[in-house]
Amino acid sequence: MSTYFQDYLTVGAFAAFGVVLVLVMLGVAAILRPSNPTEEKLTTYECGVDPVGTGWSQTYVRYYIFGLLFVLFDVEAVFIFPWALIAEDLGVFGLVAILLFMLTLVEGLFYAIKKGVLRWE
């Protein structure tokens, strides 16, 4: 067997060992844990408020949009920090590329503002 496949075999062995270890620990925990279910323990608990109603409620889409915008600008930071580390090595091409990247994101932000997505009512 070549050393190339031996490396994969090693990774596979460690992955299998990890899966077995997790299963063994879950089994030990299932055997040792106390089990005393009561009706009070099985009820839904949310911040000290007793559950009332069916539990169905509709969430506004704007929460998802705020989350999406957060992820968008968080990912922007992930791309800008490595660029900043090697900005001098990239020269003018790197500067133009990051400016186009940032302008595209700012365009998306202005579009969201124009559509009224960021207006909280």
Image (cartoon, helix red, strand yellow):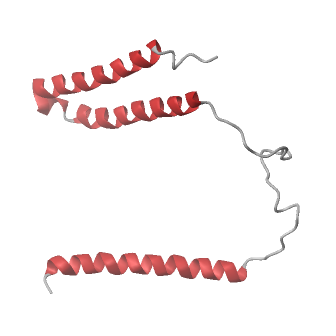
Residue at x 56% of width, y 16% of height: 119
Residue 11: x percent and y percent? 30, 75
Quarter of the picture containing the C terminus is top right
Residue at x 32% of width, y 77% of height: 12
> Would you say 73 lies left or right of 91 here?
right
How many numbered circles does the render carry? 0
Residue 93: x percent and y percent? 11, 26
Residue 83: x percent and y percent? 24, 34
Q: Is 82 situated above or below 115?
A: below
User: Within the image, what quadrant is residue 28 found in?
Assistant: bottom right
Residue at x 18% of width, y 27% of height: 97
Residue 21: x percent and y percent? 50, 79
> Would you say 53 lies left or right of 80 here?
right
Q: Residue furthest bottom?
A: 1
Q: Which of 98 and 57 is in front in this view?
A: 57
Q: Is 30 situated above or below 39?
A: below
Q: Which of 41 and 4 is in front in this view?
A: 41
Residue at x 62% of width, y 30% of height: 60
Q: Is 54 situated above or below 7?
A: above
User: Within the image, what quadrant is residue 1 found in?
Assistant: bottom left
Q: Is 58 situated above or below 104?
A: below
